[in-house]
Each structure stands twice: as C-alpha cells, then as structure tokens.
Amino acid sequence: MEHVVNRYFRRKKAAMTVLMVTSEAIPFAKSGGLGDAVPALARALKKRGIDVGIVMPRYYSTDKNTLFKYPNAMGVPMGDTERWCAVYRTELPSSRIPVWMLDREDLFGRQGLYGPDGSHSWADNSLRFAFLSAAAFQLSRFLGRIPDILHLHDWQSAPVAWLLKHFERARGFEHTASVLTIHNLGYQGVFPPSEAAIFPQEALNAGFADLLRGADMNFLAAGINCADAINTVSPSYAKEILLPEYSEGLGAELNAKTDRLRGILNGMDYADWNPARDKALRPLNYDWYWLRGKAKLKARLQREAGLPLREDVPLFGMVTRLTGQKGIDLLTDIHSPALKEFREGRAQLAILGSGERRYEEALEGISKEIPENCRARIGFSGPYSRLVEAGSDFFIMPSRYEPCGLNQMYSLRYGTLPIVRRTGGLADTVRSLDTSPQSGNGFVFNKPDSRELGDTLSRAVSFYKNTKTLQKVRKRAMRLRFDWNASSEQYEALYRQAMEE
C-alpha cells in the first residue's frame, strides 16, 4: 500500500510540488466559494504537470470508513506540548490528486465548519486552525517530502506563512515558499493575544509582532505579513482591497505588500456545471443551440418553489449566503424599492440560502406576505441550487463586495443573465447590457442601494419582454468561458515568483 499512498510528488522528471492547506474542499466540506475553488484549481495545476496535494481536516460528515488510514499517528508540536492525530488519505473524485485528512474528533468532529450556524463561531477556532497550520509541516515530514510551495487559503491556514518564516524555515523547509490566496478579506481569524500560546514559543519569540494586528492576534494579517506571495481571486478585488472602504482594517499591511500582491480570477468547472449534462436537470438538459429545456425547467422551478406557473413574467433566482456582504438586506424589507416588481406581480423570485437568522426570518416573512411572487427556501440543496440556476431568467447578486463570485459564472453558462453590483469579480465577468448592448451579458448597478437595485430589476423586467433579444443574449452568455486554464498558468507564475522571493 505504501507505493500507493506516497504517490504524491513522484514523477520521472522533477516537477514543482505544491501542498494546498485548506479548511474546505468539495465534495468533503463546503461553506462557500472556497470549497469549490480549491479542488478546481488543484485539477488545473495537475494538468500543467505540477504535483499537487491537499491537506484539510476530517470533519465528522466524512465517513472515515471510506478513507485509507495510515497505521501510525502523527504528532504536531503546539505550544509547550504535542497534539496527536490520525492521518487519512483519499483522492479528489475523478482525479489522482491526494487529499490528506487530519482526524481529531475534539477539534473537527462537530456540525458546522466554523460555528454551529452562520451567526456564531466555535470558541476554539484559534486552536482548530492553528493545529491545521502546524500540521501541514508535520504531514510533509510524515510523507517524507518537503514541497516547493505551501499554498494557503484564507485565514484558516494563513498562519502557515508565519510559522514558515519564524520557525519551520530553519527546520528543513529552507527552499519552501508560501503563497497566500485571499478568498475573502472580511474573515480574518481574530483572537485574543493570550491565545497565541497555542504556537511554539520559539516562533513567538522570533515573530510575535507579525502575528498581531493592533491589540489582537490576527491570523490573516500574520499571513499577509509573512507570505512570499499573495493573491486575491479577481483583478478588481486586488485593487479594491488597497482602498480604505474595502481593506477591512488591513490597508497598511496590504499596501506594504503591493509588490507581492496579484489578482487572479477564479475559473469555474465547466465539466461539472454544464446544462447539457447536469444530472439535476434531467431529462430537460439544454445548451445554447437548444434552449427548449430551459423554459420547461422554469416551470419545474416554479412548481418546486411553490410559485404559480407563469410564462408572462420573468423569474429571478438567488443562491447565496444570507449575510450583509451578499447584499441580502436590500431584499429583506417588504416595502423596499428592490421588491417593487415582486410586490406588484410583474416578476417572481426564488431564493435558496442560509446564514444569519435575522435574514432567514425576514425572507420567511416575505414568502408569507407575497407567496405568489416570492418564495425562499432556507438551507442548502445541491440539486435545487442547480435548478435555480437553470430555471431562472435572471440571477441576482447585489453583493457589497465580492472577491470573485462563482454564481454569476454558473448563471452565464446556464443562460440565466446575472444582475450584479459593480465590484470585485462581478465587475470582471459581467458586462452591462445598459452600456454594451452588442456585447453585454447581464445588468450591472453601482451603489449597494435598494432603490438602485430596484431600478435595475425593473430594466430587466422590461428587457424580458423582448424575447428575440433575450434569446440572443442568453446564447452569447452561454458561450463565454472563464475556465481554470489561464488562471492556473498565472498561479504557476506566482509560485515561481514566490520561490524567487
């Protein structure tokens, strides 16, 4: 079995080796776009000849009986002690990319990746993800090979860069570089400085200041301070986070690293998100050259959502986390201008999402007040999310900020025209029909304001009436491609830059 489990990093010719450290990756764990992006990028990198593997926690939702278990436990130095864990191995589906899972029931054997719900965090998150970060180094030793690149994703693994600089580089990782990808600057891993004792004292003696942002311990700030290269998941977001209104308090740290900061647009998995083959849509699959199935899927969505079957009005869809970042508050007041078209029966709205309870309750209330025009389903369902993408005429993403966004890409592929705010990756992927009628693929508004969103929705309602133009734009949108090929090439260049640093 040893020749199988240590296949990672082995090639006839020396290849760049990358170990991704992440808190989530589909199909094992997902709370947002991070879970989609990590495995998709890993697959694209492998196609470029890069040896890539992933390390993540084993959450209780992953059945350990489906995994290979290494016979020996692994010790991870933390603070003044050593914490042990079991190590499991599996592979990303339809690939030979290894995924190593760290098993500690006391840290990861619970429901909810970061907290029991969207409004609360686990009290021991600093320990949970400090353990993940420290374990990345031990896993490399455990497997017998040190990677060229440690690729870190968001605050949960950002301390890897800090540990590498102040502790591990002198302990066998002299030629390893760190790359930090910021998927969302709004989540930083902020904890009391007293909790820094979870890290080795030698590292604290050398670099305690880099672990802090103000009076707090800040995992993401530590990663920014210490990473050899940094990127965000779209070019526009890389520029926005240098501005005070988008920097989330880390403007000084980011502006000090502009020579190491890049914006690389996430791609999407066109093999997975393909309306012509999507199993959730059977038997009504369609593509840009055969759109008849989309109209029937609209009726299916209306039935499943509990909305009247109406072809005469557009159906707007949303699949989102119910948080302020996503701009959901613009649609949670029954009297807001953004809901005018739905209140007055000129459009329908189907929402799928979960998150902050106040928004869940508000949407449940609106569903009761205007049930014939608005229905919200609280929770998450993969098949239903795909039905919303396929069966809707328009897809709403009113985000206050959006590092990249994937749903607008999914929507374009499914011929569902996105309605987005001009920010981050939304601005990089959606071209407004208002200003570019010959090349546009959706509608774009500027301010996170309910009235401006309402005006944009009204324009979309009017646009829906021109069936011929609507079909033309749908076909144009479905032929667009934002795949990982170009993105993975840019990541390889970023890796080489980091190694030079």
Image (tube, rainbow, N blue to C red):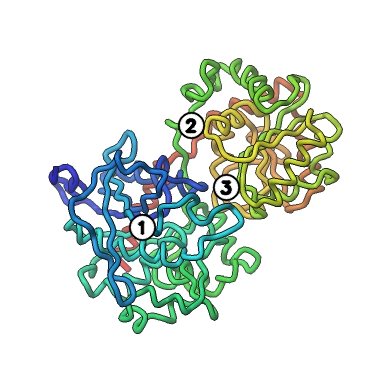
Residue 328 % position (x, y)? 70, 48
For numbered disc 1, what is the local secondary structure?
strand
The relative height of residue 398 versus residue 294 in the rendered view (above or below) is below
Q: Is residue 427 visible?
A: yes
Q: Earlier in the sequence, mark 3 or mark 2?
A: 2
For numbered disc 2, what is the local secondary structure?
loop
Q: Earlier in the sequence, mark 1 or mark 2?
A: 1
In the displayed structure, does residue 360 sit left or right of residue 107?
right
Residue 487 % position (x, y)? 42, 47
Residue 36 % position (x, y)? 46, 44
Judging depth in this view, the residue of 429 and 102 nearest the camera is 102
Please tell me how many numbered marks the rendered image carries: 3
In the displayed structure, does residue 339 sit left or right of residue 245?
right
Residue kind at label 1, given as amino acid type: His
Identify the residue position indicated by label 3 in the image. Answer: 428
Identify the residue position indicated by label 2 in the image. Answer: 273
Judging depth in this view, the residue of 240 and 276 nearest the camera is 276
Q: Nearer the viewer, mark 3 or mark 2?
A: 2
Quadrant of the image containing the N terminus: top left
> From mark 3 to mark 1, how far is it between C-alphas?
24 Å
Judging depth in this view, the residue of 477 and 221 nearest the camera is 221
Q: Which mark is residue 151?
A: 1
> From mark 3 to mark 2, how far is it between C-alphas?
20 Å
Rendered image quadrant of residue 467: top right
For numbered disc 3, what is the local secondary structure?
helix
Residue furthest to the front in view is: 106
